[in-house]
Image (tube, rainbow, N blue to C red):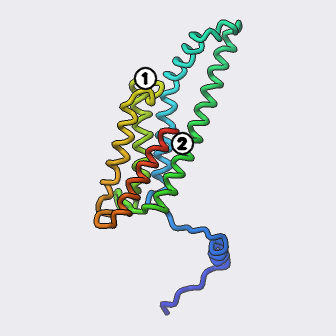
Amino acid sequence: MGSKEPPTPAEQGTKDADRHTGRSREPGPTDRVFWLIAYALTVGALLLRMPTVHDVVRDELRDSGLAGKVEDKSMEALAVNVGLLLAVLLSMLLLGIFYSLAAMVEKKIFSARRKVGGKRGFGLFFAVAVLCTLPVYVVSSALGVSSPKETGYYYVYVLVIALAAPFLFRGHWVGRGRRSIITVFAFSCGVAGLSLLV
C-alpha cells in the first residue's frame, strides 16, 4: 500500500532515450503557449505593414528607372509581389529563429519566472524579445512606416527595453554577486540587439 507503481515499458524507454541522448524535458520559464501567441501576433502585425511596404517598393522601383525597361506592367507588379512574399517568408523565419534563441537563453542563463494568472508565467528574455518586436511592428503599421529602423527613436526604444526589462525580475537577481547581475543585463542587451536583425 502506498508503493509507487513501476513505469510502463514506453515510459521507461522514453527515460532511457533521454538519458542516453542528454535531452532534458525540463521546460523553460516561459510557457510555450506564450511564445506561440507572441509569434502569431508579431507575424500578424508584420502582415499589416505589407501594404505600406508594397507602396514604398513600387515607388522606389519606378523612381529607379528600372520600371521603364519593363514594357509589361503586369510583370512589374508580379516582380514586386514575389519580392514582398519572399521578404515576408524570410522575416517569419528570422523571427522564429530569434524567439527560439531567446527561449534557449532564458532557459540556460536566467530561468527566473514571473507568474501570470495561476500556473502560467514568462521569463526575462521572453519579455525582451517580444517588447523589441511586437510593439515596433504594431506602431509602424499604425503610422504607415515601412521601416522603423530609419528613425533613431527605434534604437533608443530597444536600448531602454534592454536596460529596463531586468527590473521586472529584480527580486530574482538582487543580492546576487556583481558578476551575476552584469551577466543578466549583458544578455538582456544581447537579446535586444539581436532584435535589430529581425
Residue at 36%, 36% (x, y): give it.
Answer: 156
Kindly identify which numbered label has been placed on residue 95: 2
Residue at label 1? 144
Looking at the picture, which amino acid does disc 1 mark? Answer: Gly
In this rendering, the answer to whether 169 lies above or below 162 is below
Residue at 41%, 35% (x, y): give it.
Answer: 136
Name the side, left or right, on which 163 lies relative to 129: left
In this rendering, the answer to whether 117 lies above or below 45 is below
Residue at the far bottom: name it.
1
Q: Point out residue 135 in the picture as x, y percentages from the top left corner.
A: 40, 37
Give the alpha-carbon distance from disc 1 to disc 2, as whole Å: 21 Å
Q: Residues within 10 Å of mark 1 (few under 14, many from 20)?
A: some
Q: Point out residue 61 in the picture as x, y percentages from the top left corner.
A: 59, 14
* Secondary structure of residue under mark 1: loop
Q: Nearer the viewer, residue 21 or 39?
A: 21
Q: Residues within 10 Å of mark 2 (few under 14, many from 20)?
A: many
Q: Nearer the viewer, residue 46 or 180?
A: 180
Residue at 47%, 34% (x, y): give it.
Answer: 45
Q: Point out residue 139 in the picture as x, y percentages from the top left corner.
A: 39, 31
In this rendering, the answer to whether 146 lies above or below 1 is above
Residue at the far front: name it.
179
